[in-house]
């Protein structure tokens, strides 16, 4: 892939015997559609979810997609937390940031609050009373939250995040795309 994207939005979905990983590449936070959509199905038996160990399940799948991107986008957005505590205990995004040698900023957008979260920046969108929880590495969290807030869409979940989630689910259901 030789498109020079500024931002890659990534997500993973699971079935009993496979996982789907999807990526949207775009130049702008505010666009309604991605310049490029990528997805793939990975045959595997996904490991069980373990609180605080989410990265063990998703990191290899994200890397399977990211490693195919040349050049690497300037920033990656994941579905989940970058940090699991105010003391910088790494979550999925923190482990990804480390795996990429801290060279590519990571923004984490979680739909569900991690236990006792006091460190993320809540972002309220649309008419929703429930926030998204934003954490970041390599970029200030407040700036990342403002960027997430500016994303296209009238609802709680921005358009591109809805699309990458749907694309990951389709990859599981339909195979490689």
Image: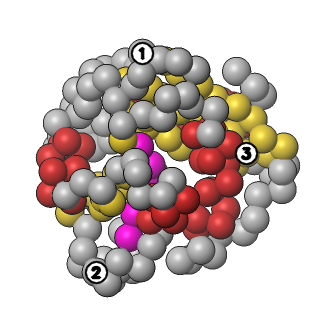
Mark sitting earlier along the chain (1/3):
3
Q: Residue 19 occupies which quadrant of the picture? A: top right
Which residue is label 1 attached to? 35
Residues in magenta?
Answer: 76-83
Q: Is residue 134 left or right of residue 103?
A: left
Q: How is the image coloured?
A: secondary structure
Near mark 1 (Cα within 10 A), the count class, few <14, some 14-19 or many ≥20, is few
Residue 86, numbered circle: 2
Q: Which numbered disc, 1 or 3, marks the residue closer to the eye?
A: 1
Which secondary structure lies at badge 1? loop
Q: Give residue 99's mark.
A: none
Question: Is 152 located above or below residue 127 in the figure?
Answer: above
| Dot placed on the residue nearer the N-terminal end, 1 or 2 | 1
Q: CA distance from mark 3 to mark 2?
A: 31 Å
Which residue is drawn at the image coordinates 45% and 73% (left, top)?
A: 90
**Identity of the residue drawn at 84% across and 50% down:** 44
Q: In this orientation, which residue lies closer to the viewer: 1 or 76?
A: 1
């Amino acid at each position: 892939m030789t498109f020079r994207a500024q931002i890659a939005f990534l997500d993973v979905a699971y079935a009993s015997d496979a996982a789907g990983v999807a990526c949207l590449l775009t130049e702008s936070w505010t666009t309604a559609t991605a310049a490029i959509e990528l997805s793939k199905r990975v045959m595997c038996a996904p490991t069980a979810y373990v609180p605080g160990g989410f990265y063990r399940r998703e990191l290899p799948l994200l890397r399977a997609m990211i490693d195919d991107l040349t050049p690497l986008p300037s920033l990656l957005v994941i579905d989940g937390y970058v940090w699991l505590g105010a003391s910088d205990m790494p979550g999925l995004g923190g482990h990804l940031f480390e795996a990429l040698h801290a060279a590519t900023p990571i923004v984490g957008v979680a739909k569900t609050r991690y236990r006792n979260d006091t460190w993320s920046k809540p972002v309220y969108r649309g008419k929703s009373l429930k926030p998204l929880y934003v954490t970041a590495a390599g970029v200030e969290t407040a700036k990342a939250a403002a960027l997430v807030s500016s994303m296209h869409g009238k609802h709680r979940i921005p358009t591109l995040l809805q699309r990458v989630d749907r694309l990951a689910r389709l990859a599981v259901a339909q195979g490689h795309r």
